[in-house]
Amino acid sequence: ISTLKPVRSYASRLVNGINQILTQLLTYNDLWKNDKQKYTSRFALKSRTYFDYDEIMKVFFKINQTFDRYLINKNIYSIELCFKQFYQALKYHCNEWINHYGQHLYNKISNKLKEIDDILNNLYQNLNHDTDTVPDLKFVLNIITQINQQQELIGHQIHDIIQSYQILNQYHFEYPYTESILIQTLFPRLIELVEQSHIVQHRLKPIRERFREIIQYDIELFQRMIDELVDKFDKYGPYTIDNDLNQMFLLIKQYEKEIDKIEQRKIELINIMKLFYIPLINYPKLIRIQKEINGLNILFNLYDEFKKNKKLWSNILWTELNINDLINNVDLFIKNFRRLSQDIRTPVVGHTVEKYLTGN
């Protein structure tokens, strides 16, 4: 028995030594996962920056480096263990994790590279658009404004693209050489685009002044259109008709169409005036007519609803007619009319509608 004690002690130390090594290697158990795509895709689903990808890829890169420092052969109490293939397998899986994360970063950033490339191309092309007409000039001036507003954002996006590709290079991720060439052109193209926009803006100054004169004429013409409409409305509009509600409201719809056209033209003029920094103009006469038309439409809706109900009531048989319900319904329409503001109720159309509702 005494002779077995050294053997048992040796065996115990041997087992403990092997267990220590295995315990240490078990900390890398997750490296062996087969569903790497699933885990990396879940990571990529969230809004990740290039810094996030760098941090996660750095973890596996450092683990990979640790295996280079491990001894391939380990001697444990005269028993030599060979870990070469085992370490190679672990390094392979580390690289697999890095490649999966790198692929997600590449997919994201290569799309962004194409997007920025298209944006720069389109802005440059649109900046050189013809300026022979007001719409064309407006288009180019909007492009200049767009360049001034977006240059800082585009600059940040280019910086992110460059940093992302540098991370891919750091972890030896392969991608088309054409993309590396394209990346180098982004900042110079952005600088050239901004400089060109300043040149075009300066060149367009005399053209803008010429168009300003044309627009001033259009503004005066628009004011005359409003004056003519208001004059016609006051002389021949619905307020000039007596006791013919159908004719009144037919006329209202005609004026409403004319006002819609004028309003559309006003919006176009306002957009152009803003473009040329011309002070905006109020049109009190137009506002007054629009307000009156809105009031007349309220009266028309009340009149039209009462007219429809009156037709329904007239078709009810006397035996089925409830006089109290009829009186209550009529009173409800009259109350709704009297709740309207005074400036809607008091003009001639309002009085005519009231007479129609009350049966006077």
Image: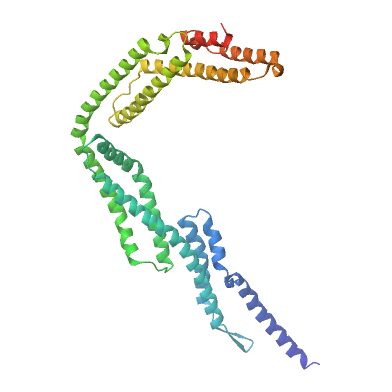
From what the image shows, is residue 109 above or below residue 328?
below
Question: Looking at the image, can residue 69 be seen?
Answer: yes
Q: Quadrant of residue 215?
A: top left
Q: Position of residue 68 (x, y in %)?
A: 50, 76
Left or right for 134, reference 291 = left
From what the image shows, is residue 117 above or below residue 22?
above
Q: Nearer the viewer, residue 38 or 97?
A: 38
Task: Point out the residue furthest to the right here.
Answer: 1
Left or right for 312, reference 239 = right
The image's colouring method is: rainbow
Q: Position of residue 175 (x, y in %)?
A: 38, 67
Q: Position of residue 1 (x, y in %)?
A: 81, 92
Q: Nearer the viewer, residue 122 or 312?
A: 312
From what the image shows, is residue 262 above or below residue 120?
above
From what the image shows, is residue 313 above or below residue 6?
above
- The C terminus sits in image quarter: top right
Q: Nearer the viewer, residue 322 or 290?
A: 322
Q: Position of residue 217 (x, y in %)?
A: 23, 23
At x 51%, y 75%, the residue is: 92
Q: Nearer the viewer, residue 79 or 196?
A: 196
How many marks the image carries: the answer is 0
Q: Quadrant of residue 111?
A: bottom left
Question: Looking at the image, can residue 193 be seen?
Answer: no
At x 24%, y 44%, the residue is: 129
